Amino acid sequence: MDILPILATLRRHKITALLIVLEIALTCAIVCNAVFLISQRMHRMGMPSGVAEHELVQVQVVDIGDRPDAKARGEEDLAALRAIPGVKSVARINQLPFTDSSWNNSIFLSPTQTQPTLNATMYFGINVLQTLGTRLVAGRDFNPDEYAEYRDAIRDPKLTPPVVVITQALAQKLWPGESALGKTIYFDPQTPLRVIGVVAGLIRPSLSEGESAAQWGTVVPLRFSGGGSYALRTAPGQRQRVINAAVTALKTLDPKRIIRQQRTLDDARAEFFQADRAMAGMLVGVIVAVLLVTGLGIVGLASFWVAQRRRTIGVRRALGATRADILRYFQIENFLIVTLGILLGMALAYGLSLWLMAHYEMPRLPMSYLPMGAFALWLIGQLAVLGPALRAAAVPPVVATRTV
Amino acid sequence: MLAYYIDLALRSLKRHKALTALMIITIGFGVAASMTTWSVFRAVSGDPIPWKSSQLFVPQIDNWGPAGHGPKDTSNEPPDAMGYTDAVALMRDHRAKYQSAMYQIGAAVTPQRVGQHPITAIGEAVYSEFFPMLDVSFKYGSGWSAADDDQRAQVAVISSHLNQKAFGGGDSVGKTLSIDGHEYRVVGVLGDWHPQPQFYDVVNTGGFSQGGGNIFVPFTTAIANSMNNNGNTNCVESPKEPGFVGLQKSECVWIAFMVQLDDAAAARQYKQYLDNYAAAQQQAGRFNWAPNNRLRGLMDWLDYQRVVPSDTKISLYVALGLLLVCLVNTAGLLLAKFLRRSSEIGVRRALGASRREIYTQFLIEAGMVGLAGGLLGLVLTAFGIASVGWVLPRDIAALARLDVTLFITTLAVAVVATMLAGLYPTMRAAAVQPAWQLKSN
């Protein structure tokens, strides 16, 4: 089929055709960037934590005022929690993943360095690795005799045990391509720490340092009795029962304390990424709406053109054009318009992405999104034009002999 | 004549019901999407204290020097918050009309009622001038006095929410609360005062939070009673001494500060004072660098702290993009529709209608589509605002609401936008040559 007659017709409806091209271009730009934004959110939401998420629950208690016997009370709590049936492991940890508040430490590679190399999060407590279920990929866990009291360590940095377990991501960042075991890091010049173990992953509780720094983590052997949360590991099906039992046990030991948080780590993750999920949901809504509007716009215009050209169609049919010819005419016309729109739209999408990069710290739109947007629009265009085109094909040749 | 045009427009719109419906629906959709996001945007980017924001300033003092910047950070901005030493010095010098250092506290509160369980409350430790500076409204009582600041009085101001929870509401002035084991006398109960963003301490609240601002106690008392900072603490080096006292002696920053300066001259003087203060610290050997201070106005400060979540901005742009698509779509449909009526226009022109009258007729038709779209958009906006809660974070979604301004803006945007979209189609329609049209028929 010849394209030239189609172009000749379109030239007679320049502005109308141009408006449709513009609409498709805008839609293409919006859809490409929105899909990219969604994919980024999805990627963020699927971020691995490195812990046995489906087996963990968090119970956070707040005691009133300073308690001199905090350490003894802490032991009592731990004993009571350990006694709950189904609990595999208990730890009192300074922080847990997805709690949105992170305990960060500057990391130096030598005692004479003036500016820190980076900052990493710091987990501590007894049984942290075992309870969280982080996987050791090299080295070992802490020995029981390596632990010190957090209170002592903060009073005198020299009492900090000189060993640390770090994440693989941190090891790679600090010593690319080398084994981290046996190397030394410094929290400050007086506190050298030898790396004795490397874990596969342990996420920072807050992403305020950026996603690239999310897996920079350290674990130190400090015992902790004031503050933090209890983490309990159990079978996935037992979690709710364990939470209830833990709250009851803690309340029995001291009815005046406040339970600030009681939830599964799965819930914590869901809450942590709520804004991302919401944003992704809204963008899906916009994509659907914009495609729907564009599709309906094409239906409307195509219907108009078909009605306007009834007589011409009748003449063509009378001169021997088949129904298929007429159908194809409108389909090709639509394809041309949409293609033009897509070309313009790709340029626009790219420009929009550059602008977003400049203003909102967004990565560049990958080229692979452009063909995807193009395909979606071709599909929408063809679907939208099908109805009017079929109606056009149904115009009988006899129309040619009638005056309008 | 107007009635006649409206009648003509109605007839024309009725003739192509499906197309008319299509235009109305797209306009409605586009307007509703952009208005819903705009209402959220307006709520989060709005001025929390419009009558006074130009008089409120946030001073920043660089007590970290070059060490406070990472190797890649070239901004040379001082820290966002203040250390204890500087905050107390600025309070003592008292150079602004009103000023207050503040930090976030989280306390276990027990009302003096039998059988009451403790409640956790998040609030701020502030100076007495905090209340007049921010025009805080009270339901009962008032803030405390400067003398209370000096004497570290155990007094507290509570929100009406906490008043309800702790005392079951009512005038609780004079009642006692136990906060972290110390007895405090309630001197004031706040009225309906929970500004969003919590502009007085965005460093520690992040701007938007539903839980904060429930209890206020004197800064000096909180320090004396060792109420730990519940917000953020940032340090370039670890405190030399442990605990809360160590934090106070360190150069760690954790205190928010706000001052009221009534005019530009006062602001200039205050900036000069800050620079003199920093210069004195440099001379004393505490700072190893030239004064590097800032004095930002409240709105600049909120902008600098990126209090408006960028998510909200992006969704506003996305919604505006959708509106644009809807408008282009409507323009296309109107054009096709108007151009098909060339013969009708030709007849009307031949019968004596002027170009201007054709213009009016078609713009009225476009305007009516816009109005209908706007009405639909209004219904959809109301629906959108009601359901924004499961699309945006709860703290922010709660702020969006449908009011008269939004109501009028929605309708105006719909009508004006549709008429703009109809402008070119109308121009084309009015350009129709009557003779040519009559002949071709």
Image (tube, coloured by chain):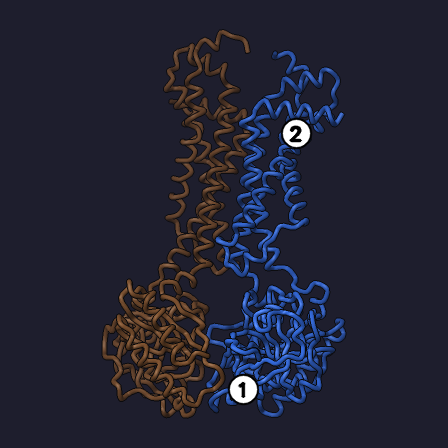
Chain colours: A brown, B blue
For mark 2, what is the residue? Answer: B365
Other-residue count near label 1 (Cα within 10 Å), few / some / many at <14 / 14–19 / ≥20: some
Question: Label 2 marks which chain's residue?
Answer: B
- Which disc, if any, is residue B226? 1
In the picture, the quarter occupied by the N terminus of chain A is: top left
At horizontal 66% and vertical 85% (from top left) the residue drawn is: B277
Q: Nearer the viewer, mark 1 or mark 2?
A: 1
Amino acid at circle 2: Glu
In the picture, the quarter occupied by the C terminus of chain A is: top right
Of residues A168 and A248, the one drawn nearer to the viewer in this rendering: A248
Q: Is residue B65 visible?
A: no
Of residues A46 and B310, the one drawn nearer to the viewer in this rendering: A46
- Return the x and y of residue A39 as percentages of the image width and height: 39, 53
At horizontal 68% and vertical 49% (from top left) the residue drawn is: B404
At horizontal 65% and vertical 63% (from top left) the residue drawn is: B48
Eyeballing the image, is B371 above or below A250?
above
Of residues B134 and B347, the one drawn nearer to the viewer in this rendering: B134
Of residues A343 and B149, the one drawn nearer to the viewer in this rendering: B149
Q: Residue furthest top?
A: A401
Other-residue count near label 2 (Cα within 10 Å), few / some / many at <14 / 14–19 / ≥20: many
From the viewer's perspective, is B217 left or right of B239? right
**Which comes sooner in the sequence, label 1 or label 2?**
1
The image quadrant of residue B256 is: bottom right
Q: CA distance from mark 1 to mark 2?
A: 71 Å
- Return the x and y of residue A139 as percentages of the image width and height: 23, 78
- Return the x and y of residue A346 as percentages of the image width and height: 45, 44
